Structures are given as structure tokens and as C-alpha cells.
Image: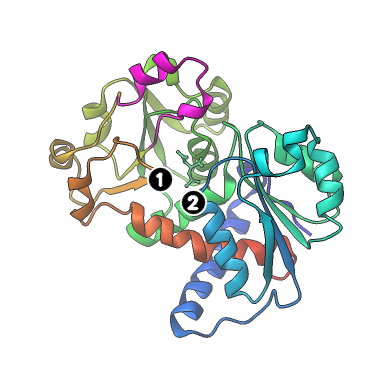
Amino acid sequence: MNHILSASQFNKGLIYKILLSAKKMETALNKGRVTKKLHDKIVACLFFEPSTRTRLSFETAVLRLGGQVIGMENGSVSSSAFKGESIPDTIKIVHGFADLIVMRHPQNGSAEVAAKTSKVPIINAGDGGNEHPTQSLLDLYTIKQETGRLENLTFTMVGDLLYGRTIHSTLTMLSLYPKNKFIFVAPKQLKLPEKYKAMLKNRKVSFKETENLAEGLKFADVIYMTRVQKERFSSKAEYEKLKLAYVFDAESLKQIKKSAVILHALPRVGEIAEVVDKDPRAAYFRQAQNGLYVRMALLQYALGLM
Ligand code: NCD
């Protein structure tokens, strides 16, 4: 079995295998010919934080592969977590029922904690403001699909780089590929944590930080917009001040390359204007759809069936 806990556990070889398998899943689904590899499997989806895309794409992936799903979409109020049950205790119960556990939890490091106890694979579907590795694999799938490559690209990452877990995981994977460059656009209060900058320096990856969106947009091959993560703020006033620090709008479309690709893990709450959606460079809805194919591949990888 393979836990999926962090982007740092993936090398280029493994990423290649997963993206290839995801492509096969896409083709098989389109032909209506998916092998029911999970026919005897039960997957538990334990969500202690809100989710639309991640939970529903995981559940759809299980069902398309012939498996069955149990779980909770509102775990922090509907499960024994509300009564104060610890993560290890919950896992000790659920691993006796299910063959794999997909978990989203507000606490940083919660997936690691679950994996220490679990007899079945744990997939981290987001642990607080820390990581979201399965989102990153669908991000890479989308980048490959839209640009034809994963290397020699300039990525401009915009918004909440402090709490944005998709950013942390996605840049960790993208920095494995040669000649990639990063431009980080964030307000002072939401800058990328030092540990990721140290990782980039260590890997000799070139990056730059700025508060100026226009400066970041000009050179970008891929623009990765993010939502300011309201749920991580202790002060509502501070969130209100920062929530629309950067808005990608019709004007921004004029500033980017003809070949640029615009990504967002979604949900958006104003940081990409709806007028942008009809531009062919807006790839975020295609990106969300790709989540299904990538998660079909990841379920098989985690269960040792890939
Ligand atoms: C992201 C998340 O939950 O981190 N959403 C997602 O999984 N598609 C991004 C976000 O909530 O801003």
C-alpha cells in the first residue's frame, strides 16, 4: 500500500507513471470502458472541512472504478470528532471497515498522524494550510495537457501563498523539472513560507517575489491564481482587507502572453472575474474535470493496483 501524504514523496518517475495512468483513465471513461479495478473495495472519505471538487471527484472516481464509498462530508460536526475523538482513534475504527481512507482535516500534519496509525492507505485531501498533493497532480496533468510540457515554464503564483496548500504542494512538484522559474505575487502578510523558498534555493530553482501583479503576469506561461484562505485567519478584519488584494480581470487578459494558461484550484470568490471564463486561456474548469482522471489513477496507486 502507498500513503499519499505530501508532494515531497513524489519524484519525476512516479509523477510520470501517475499522469500516464490518468490519461488512460480519461480515454477509458470517454469510451465507456473502465476496468472495475476497485470492484471489491470500500473507500472511506472523511471530510472535516468543506469540499466540493475534491470529495465529489474522489467519490466519482471510486464509483467509476466499481468500488463503494462510505464517509462523512461534515465530519467536524457529524462525527465523533465533535465529541472530541482524536484522529488516531477515528482511524483505528475506520481502517477496520474500509480499504482506503481519503481525509481532509483542518490541522496541519493530520494526514501524517492518520498514516502512523492506519493499516490501510491514507490519501491526504488537504491538511490545514499545509499540503494538498492530489490537487498538485491534477495541476501537473492540466499543465502538461495545456502547454505540452512540465519544464522550461515560468509560473506566476498569485494571492494567498502563505496558507494556500495547493501552492505549497504544486510548487514542490514543479520545481523538480529543469528550467522552471517562479514569480510569487502576494501581499506582505501572505508571502510564501520560508521553508519553500529554502527548498527552491536548495534545488537551485530561480524565483522572485513581488507585490505587483502586472509585473508577474507579463512573463508567465502559467498563471496560478488562489483564493485568500478565509478559514485560516484569526482576524476577520485582516481577511477583509486582503481578500481582493489581486483580481485577474479583462485588463489582466491584455497583459498576458497569447499562449498563457490560467489556473485556479477553485473555489474562486472574486479573484478571477467571470468575464475571463470565456477566454480560451482560462483552464480552471478543465483543471477541475481532470481531477477525476488523476484521482482514478491515484486510488489505484495507493492500493497497489497501478
Ligand atoms: C483548494 C483547497 O481546498 O485547498 N480547493 C480544492 O481542493 N479544489 C483551494 C481552496 O479552497 O482555495
Instruction: Report which quarter residue 61 is drawn in.
Output: bottom right
SS for dot 2: loop
In this view of the protein, which residue sits in the foreground, 97 or 107? Answer: 97
- CB within 8 Å, label 2 to label 1: yes
The residue identified by callout 1 is 266
The quarter of the rendered structure image containing the C terminus is: bottom right
Is 60 placed above or below 153 here?
A: below
Ligand 1 closer than 8 Å to the CB at disc 1? Answer: yes
Q: Say which residue appears at 40% left-offset and 56% top-offset.
A: 287
- Residue at image mark 2: 52
Q: Is residue 234 magenta?
A: yes
On screen, residue 191 above or below 119: above
Q: Is residue 98 left or right of residue 105?
A: right
Total count of labels: 2
Q: Based on the displayed image, in which of its 4 quarters is residue 250 positioned?
A: top left
Q: Amino acid at mark 1?
A: Leu
Q: Position of residue 238 (x, y in %)?
A: 41, 14
Where residue 230 appears, as percent x and y from the top left, is: 45, 27
Q: Residue at (74%, 64%) from the top-left corner?
A: 303
Q: Residue at x 49, y 44 (%)?
A: 174
Tell me the quarter of the image containing the N terminus.
bottom right
